[in-house]
Amino acid sequence: MKTEFLCTVPVLPSQDIARDLDWYSHNFGFIKTFGDHMYAGIRLEDIVIHIQWHADTAADPILGGSVVRIFVKNIEPYFESLVVKGHRR
């Protein structure tokens, strides 16, 4: 069985999930698909975005870097191909 890459999803930082959900809904038409006050997902047609709460402190900066989630089905063949090539965890 082959690995199937399903989609990539950007995870955007937020200090106020409810505010940002409302903004994306009002301005672009995104619909909340799941979540709470710490982490939520929105969708507009084939576009999916996740929003994650951050405290904006030195330990948890709001602009501390980007996160992209990569969803796959049957990851083992792909992982094994990396092992064969000599890539390390």
Image (spheres, rainbow, N blue to C red):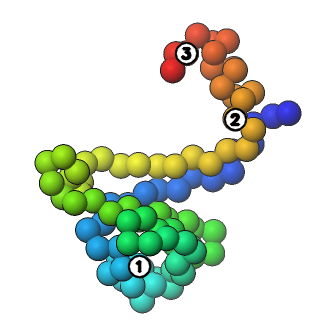
Q: Position of residue 50 (x, y in %)?
A: 47, 63
Identify residue for label 2.
75
User: Horizontally, is 11 left or right of 72 in the view?
Assistant: left
Q: To which residue does mark 3 refer? A: 87
Q: Position of residue 33 (x, y in %)?
A: 57, 74
Q: Does the residue at mark 1 contact the one at mark 2 (Cβ under 8 Å)?
A: no
Q: Nearer the viewer, residue 76 or 6?
A: 76
Which element carries disc 2, helix, strand or loop? loop
How far, Cα to Cα, is label 1 from label 2?
Answer: 31 Å
Kind of residue sitting beneath label 1: Leu
Per the rendering, the mark at residue 89 is: none
Farthest residue in the left direction?
A: 58
Residue beneath the point at 75% across and 38% down: 74
Image location of residue 67, percent across then percent down:
41, 49
Element type at marker 3?
Answer: loop
Specify few, some or many for label 2: CA neighbours under 10 Å numbering under 14, 14-19, or 20 or more: some
Question: Which sits earlier in the primary sequence, circle 1 or circle 3?
Answer: 1
Residue topped by disc 1: 21
Q: Is residue 12 above or below residue 61?
A: below
Q: Kindly give the residue lying farthest to the bottom in the view shown.
A: 26
How far apart, in angstroms, are the residues tagged by discs 1 and 3? 39 Å
Left/right of residue 52 with respect to residue 4 in the rendered view:
left
Q: How many marks?
A: 3
Tell me the distance, in whole angstroms, between the alpha carbons under discs 2 and 3. Answer: 15 Å
Tag 1 secondary structure:
helix
Give, as a three-letter code, the residue at label 2.
Answer: Ile
Graded by Cα atoms within 10 Å as few (under 14), some (14 to 19) or many (20 or more), the crowding at tag 3 reads few
